[in-house]
Image (cartoon, rainbow, N blue to C red):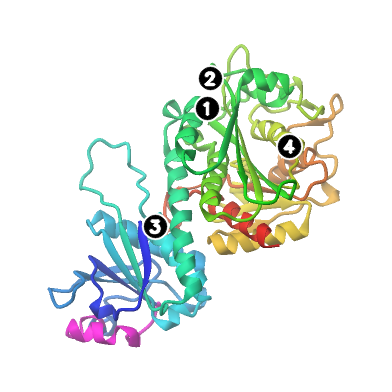
Amino acid sequence: MQARLLTTAPEKAEADALILPIFEGQSTLPPEAAALDRKLKGAITQLLADREFRGKFMELVPVHNLNTLPSKWTVLVGVGKAQELDMVRLRNVLQSAGRVLRKRGHRRVTVLLPKDVAARAGAADVARAVTEGIGLSNFDVGSLKTRHEQAVTQISTLSIVGLDGDKAASAAVKDAVVLADATNRIREWVNAPANAFTPTVFVEKVKEAVKGTGLDLKVLEVDDMRRLKMGALLAVARGSDEPAKMIVLRYSGGRKGGPMLALVGKGITFDSGGISIKPAQNMEMMKSDMGGGAAVVGAMLAIAELEPKINVIGIVPTTENMPSGKAIKPGDVVTGSGGKTIEIINTDAEGRLILSDGITYAVKEGATHIIDIATLTGSIVRTLGPLAIGAFGNDPPLMDRVRRAADLAGERIWELPTWADYDGLIDSEIADIKNSTVPWAGATTAALFLREFVEGRPWVHLDIAGSAWQDASELKTVPRGPTGSGVRVMAQLARLLAES
């Protein structure tokens, strides 16, 4: 998708659809749309006066322009109550509107930002939110269908009216296209069925994606993992006929020997639970258990284009978690590459096992800051639902930057505790630590386990088990399907660390 700021008056903009955001309860027309409304003989004013359109969040009413304007349609989009609108909701409402418009065959879209909408944040933040919202609408969850009820197009051109050519906003638009494209790419991977996205296929997809990016790719095979004594990752992989892989991507944008940010993502391409097998209901969704690993790749692709002055290493341990005669069993003890012994209490707590070897690899490679990201626990889903990423850490300054990165990315993050009061939850009587424990504080327990491997480095753990896929029918305010959670957060974090 191409995107730009436009200084043309909205009634002169050429587009298939001209989007006009309206607040809930707004009874008068925004001044910026007055000339537009005159061309339409007062149609928009009449819709507002008759309360045919009320501006409720994600409400959408198209008005045919009947050849009175260079644009074909004017589309009123409700953005909800003024006091509730932030950049997360602006992205979501435009992503939803974009999906509707592209299904109607619209390729060229213009968004008119009235001053009361544009003033909700700085010009760059608004421009980023609008661009990413429309860009994210180009993802098609039904891409594997051989027959569609109707042809689904892609929005190819976005113009934004109302920011008056602001330089920072123009730069934000350019970056937002990169970030939206990277997010959509990994949404396609997360959406892929597990039989078509094995660890081997994952590697092939990454090889194809990094061509021409300048990223350095290294793939560790099973023999490499044995040499490096990655006993935790290999233990999880034992139950599958698919060989495990570890994908390592490097971006060298900083000075040699300078700070290195490590992004470590869980790449379980299908999670049956292993011997501690999951219930059959909804197990098909476990194809998306590689969402954290995919997000790391997406972030690395975006970082390569955004070119922050920092060194970044992306690490994705990837395997299936399957039950078989070779699979690990509850009660087994394995040894990770860092030398710690781990008692297996629950084979369905496998994500933290493979991440432990990924984090240890990052430490050995010289990482100075570590972010791990994973669809890790049902506990975080029950706590935050699909609306937010759960965050845990050991370093307040790094956590503050992660929060700022999330604000820039248009994602919600909520920090949960790792207080010393929880110490003892992962203690084992027969090994150094255990991988599962009491039925409560499950997300915190997983974070405590991962903290054992960071060797004191500044670290933040992002649990995206809820935010990586939105399928709650009760929530009408968030677009459904795979979200690409974490891609833009990690890319923006790299930029913030580079600036500091």
Residue on which disc 1 sits: 199
Percent position of residue 200, x then y: 50, 25
Label 4, residues with CA under 10 Å away: few <14, some 14-19, many ≥20: few
Instruction: Tell me which amino acid carries mark 3.
Output: Gly
Mark closer to the chain start, 3 or 4:
3
Q: How much space separates mark 3 and mark 4, taking CA atoms?
A: 35 Å
- Quadrant where the image shows the C terminus: bottom right
Location of mark 2 (residue): 242
| Of residues 210 and 186, the one drawn nearer to the viewer in this rendering | 210
Q: Position of residue 380 (x, y in %)?
A: 63, 47
Residue 135 circle label: 3
Residue 418 is left or right of residue 137, and the answer is right
Residue drawn at 49 percent across, 35 percent down: 206
Is label 1 or label 4 in front?
4
Q: Quadrant of the N terminus?
A: bottom left
Circle 4 or circle 2, nearest the eye = 4
The residue shown at (42%, 63%) is 131
Q: In x, y percent, where is residue 26?
A: 37, 83
Question: How far is mark 1 from mark 4, CA to CA?
Answer: 23 Å
* Label 2 crowd bin: few (<14), some (14–19), many (20+), radius 10 Å: some
In the rendered image, the vertical position of residue 401 relative to residue 167, given as above or below: above
Q: Is residue 356 left or right of residue 77?
A: right
Distance from disc 3 to disc 1, alpha carbons, whole Å, reads: 28 Å
Does the segment drawn in magenta span residue 344?
Answer: no
Tell me whether the residue at label 1 lies in contact with that at label 2, contact meaning CB atoms closer than 8 angstroms.
Answer: yes
Residue 177 visible? The answer is yes
Instruction: Give the residue displayed 40% in from the left and 68% down from the top.
Output: 57
In the displayed structure, 259 sits above or below 228; it is below
Q: Amino acid at mark 4?
A: Glu
- Amino acid type of the residue tagged 2 in the rendering: Glu
Q: Secondary structure at mark 2?
A: loop
